[in-house]
Structures are given as structure tokens and as C-alpha cells.
Amino acid sequence: MNETQGTTQDEGLELRTDRLLSATPEQGFDAYTDPAQQRIWFSILDEEPGIVEIETDLRVGGQQTAVWGPDEQTLVREVQTFLEIDRPHRLVTESVGSDPSGGTMTTRVTVTFEAEGAGTRMRVAQSGFPTPEVRDFFAGMAWQGAFDRIAAYLERR
């Protein structure tokens, strides 16, 4: 049940992507937002354990801070501020990310979880990318990798 549909749209610098997960909307939402579950799925497919640190204050106006990477020299940092929370259906955040080079980017991320058949369709819309190349990286690599990890975590539960 790991089917992927649409990837990017050519409407400005926004991406839309989704994945069908073997889970209920509640299980998908919680896997995506709960720091204890995130610590597992962030590295579930890695051959070597890396660094994963996550703190979450899941309330409107609260923040999630995630720091991850294979080692101290290559850490990615993301701070998300929760703008809307409708558990287990919808989550909207402003995301400020930084990479090991010190580059930063601010985007708006909307994630929805909708029951579909025996699973849940997790949909992502993210906007505010600085270039089409960055948007395409997130659509083709970052989100697909996150979907792969979340799906693997949910299937092993």
C-alpha cells in the first residue's frame, strides 16, 4: 500500500505530493507529529544510526524543532511553527529549515490525512521555495524519503 501519486505542479513554487499509507488517519497523524515516533522513523531506513533530536509543542503557536543527520558536521535543522491543527485530519505549519552550509529557507507546509480504503492518503502541499530546483528536490527526494520512512515505520508497528 505504498503507492505514490502526483509530484510537483508547475503553479509557481509549490509542490503537491501524496502517499497511501497502511494506517488510520490517527496513526498517520501521530506518526508524523509525535516526537517519540519521529525519532524512530527519521532513521528507520538508515544503515548507520545518525543523530535525531526532536522536541514538539503540538498546539497552535507551538513549535517543533528537529535536528538530524549522519553526524555533527552534516546536521539539518528545521523549526516548524504550528498554524493550524485539526487532529487527525490537517496540520499547517510555517517551516524554517537550515542545511549544513548555513543556507535557510522558509516555507508553508499543509499536511492532510484522509481515510482511503483500508489506509490513509497523506497529502502534502508546500509553498515558498526559492527556486524550481529546490522545489523539485523536495518533491522528488525529501518528501518521498519521508513517505518511505513513515510507511516503513507504520508497517513495522
Image (tube, grey):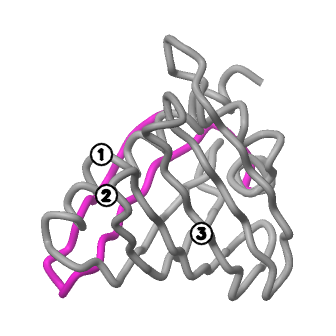
Q: Is the residue under label 2 in contact with that under label 1 (CB below 8 Å)?
A: yes
Q: Secondary structure at mark 2?
A: helix
Type of the residue with mark 3: Thr
> Can you tell which mark lies on residue 112?
3
Residue in the image at 51% along x and 29% along y: 71
Badge 3 crowding class, 10 Å Cα cut-off, few under 14, some 14 to 19, many 20 or more, is: many
Q: Is the residue under label 3 in contact with that under label 1 (CB below 8 Å)?
A: no
- Label 1 to label 2: alpha-carbon separation: 5 Å
Residue bearing mark 2: 138
Residue bearing mark 1: 141
- Label 2 to label 3: alpha-carbon separation: 17 Å
Where does residue 19 sit, x and y in percent of width and height?
A: 45, 49
Badge 2 crowding class, 10 Å Cα cut-off, few under 14, some 14 to 19, many 20 or more, is: some
Work out whether mark 1 precedes mark 3 in sequence or the reverse, and give the earlier one.
3
- Residue 139 vs 45, above or below: the answer is below
Which span of residues is magenta-colored?
Answer: 1-25
Type of the residue with mark 1: Met
Which of 34/134 is in front? 134
Which of 130/12 is in front? 130
Where does residue 92 sit, x and y in percent of width and height?
A: 62, 80
Work out whether mark 2 precedes mark 3 in sequence or the reverse, and give the earlier one.
3
Say whether residue 133 is magenta.
Answer: no
Residue in the image at 65% along x and 25% along y: 155
Q: Secondary structure at mark 3?
A: strand
Q: How many marks?
A: 3
